[in-house]
Amino acid sequence: QSPILKVENLETAFDIEGKLYNAVDNVSFEVKPKQIVGVVGESGCGKSVMSLSVMKLLPKGIGSIRNGEVLFEGKNIAPLSDKEMNKIRGKDISMIFQEPMTSLNPVFTIGYQLQETLFNHMKISKKEARDKSIALLKSVGISRPEKIVDEYPHQLSGGMRQRVMIAIAIACQPKLLIADEPTTALDVTVQAQILDLLKEIQEVNNMAIILITHDLGVVAEMCDEVIVMYAGRIVEKTDVDTLFHNPKHPYTELLMNAIPKMDEEVETLSTIEGIVPSLQKMPHAGCRFANRCPKAMPECKIMTPQLAETEAGHEVSCLLYETSKPKEGAMV
Ligand code: SF4
Ligand code: MG
């Protein structure tokens, strides 16, 4: 089956005081129709920048795609203009974020914001748009949608607002939904409900989902494939069963140990010592995880590991594996 999204050698840079820094470095992956692909890593690992690159929503004048391709249904959308992207965003590819209060406009009703998306991409009457809005709210599990449609975002709970965001995102039946930490701001019970809802609409609408999270527990529950990112690079990539039964990268192993237990509410991966290096402090050579890695060897600070298959369908970037050692003459 050919992928719905294929990202190839994506490189996204940020301009900080006139100097360019790679926030996403040579990232390649694909998403097949109806797949849920998890992208996992701590904050600052480039997950959000990667997805904003795909959507072409990078901060203007600061972030830019420097290299690579973003193939949506075989067509490279990386060079498209804003105007051309507006036809794709919200229609073929949608995105939901962590904090729905900031993505919903406080001065407009829920119904208005749903209908705005519908009018952008469809030729329908006001009456049809209102009816469709109510049906959409119902489809995301909102009770009394006829009432909610005329309410404002602040009148709803966090969980309800996220349901509204999902309704807006799926209004035009996109083929791909990018969900960036969709449940992180919600309490545990509501988190579970929103994840169930995402799974349900994925099945009903036959969508693919890229699910960005810092929580491997969420990945285990939801995803088919998983990409582990560290400091702008992919360090491990495989299917979910393989990752959980046979994690190979030391960073993945640490993430596994940091999976929040059901009875704790953990927002950060406090069990991994140290922090992700900031863009300006990224080491120029060697493995970017070297200063935190419990298995680091002397060569890890000199040799840059390559992402390569250690076995079929399992890619790892770590010098513990022969396959990741740079070829002769390619020492960086
Ligand atoms: Fe650790 Fe070295 Fe592997 Fe990097 S390359 S993850 S520092 S063992
Ligand atoms: Mg993020």
Image: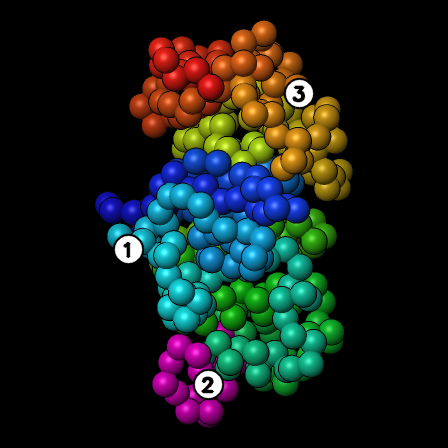
Q: Residues within 10 Å of mark 1 (few under 14, many from 20)?
A: few
Q: Which of pointers 1 and 3 lies earlier in the amino acid sequence?
A: 1
Residue at mark 1 to residue at mark 3: CA–CA distance: 39 Å
Q: Residues within 10 Å of mark 3 (few under 14, many from 20)?
A: some
Residue at horizontal 50%, vertical 33%? 233
| Foreground tag (2 vs 1) | 1
Q: Can the viewer see residue 200 in this picture? A: no
The residue to which callout 1 is attached is 75
Residue found at the very far front of the displayed protein: 18
Left or right: 283 with respect to 139? right
Task: Read off the magenta span.
Answer: 119-136
The residue to which callout 3 is attached is 292
Q: Residues within 10 Å of mark 2 (few under 14, many from 20)?
A: many
Residue at horizontal 41%, vertical 31%? 238
- Closer-to-camera residue (296/139): 296
| Foreground tag (3 vs 2) | 3
Amino acid on which the number 2 mark rests in the picture: Ala
The residue to which callout 2 is attached is 129
- Closer-to-camera residue (20/120): 20
- SS category of the residue bearing label 2: helix
